[in-house]
């Protein structure tokens, strides 16, 4: 099991696969709020990307407190995983619609995100890892 402040090439590969992630934010009272999400990663392992919509609990939470955690466990091998604690360093609207379509292709095999709601504003949450634990990657 290795520890770092950046994802290894093996962990990048894991996050590039259609693996479900658990994204943890902090509620106003400090309690954790967990959401299963699709996940993306920058090729150098320097940032993890979560795509969501404005106005959701997780976006409200990270607006107040940018500390987050993400865990990804290989659905075929429980001993292959990456655990990330980090900080939201950017909230980006530009390119967020195209990004959710890219994730729909990765996870659903569809060219566009089929669950888009009228008027929703997508946002990419860019996470800088501060503490990464990996196993089997």
Image (cartoon, rainbow, N blue to C red):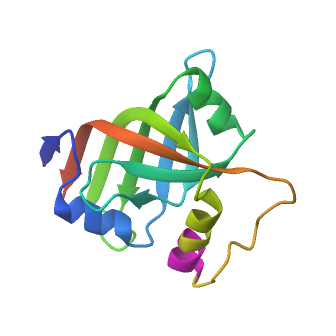
Quarter assignment of residue 79? bottom left
Residue 65: % across, % down: 53, 22
Query: What residue appears at the point 64 percent right and 37 percent down from the top-left corner?
Result: 59
Magenta: main secondary structure equals: helix
Is 25 rendered above or below residue 102?
above
Query: What residue appears at the point 34 percent right and 58 percent down from the top-left corner?
Result: 42
Residue 11: % across, % down: 25, 60
Query: What residue appears at the point 53 percent right and 33 percent down from the top-left corner?
Result: 25
> Magenta stretch containing residue 57, yes or no?
no
Residue 38: % across, % down: 53, 61
Left or right of residue 87, residue 119 in this image: right
Is residue 136 in sight in this rendering? Answer: no
Range of magenta residues: 103-108
Left or right of residue 47, residue 37 in this image: right
Return the residue found at the far right. 118
Residue 89: % across, % down: 43, 34
Return the residue found at the far left. 2
Is residue 44 in sight in this rendering? Answer: yes
Is 21 rendered above or below residue 111?
above
Left or right of residue 135, residue 87 in this image: right
Left or right of residue 114, residue 7 in this image: left
Query: What residue appears at the point 19 percent right and 64 percent down from the top-left corner?
Result: 10
**Location of the C terminus (image quadrant):** bottom left
């Amino acid at each position: 099991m290795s520890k770092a402040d950046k994802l290894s090439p093996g962990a990048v590969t894991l996050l590039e696969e259609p693996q479900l992630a658990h994204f943890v934010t902090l509620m106003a009272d400090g309690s954790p709020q967990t959401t299963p999400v699709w996940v993306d990663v920058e090729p150098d392992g320097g940032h993890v990307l979560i795509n969501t919509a404005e106005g959701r609990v997780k976006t409200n939470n990270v607006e107040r407190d940018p500390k987050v955690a993400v865990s990804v466990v290989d659905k075929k091998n429980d001993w292959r995983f990456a655990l990330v604690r980090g900080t939201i360093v950017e909230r980006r609207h530009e390119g967020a619609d195209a990004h959710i379509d890219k994730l729909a292709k990765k996870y659903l095999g569809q060219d566009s995100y089929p669950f888009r709601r009228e008027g929703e504003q997508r946002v990419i949450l860019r996470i800088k890892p501060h503490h990464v634990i990996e196993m089997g990657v």
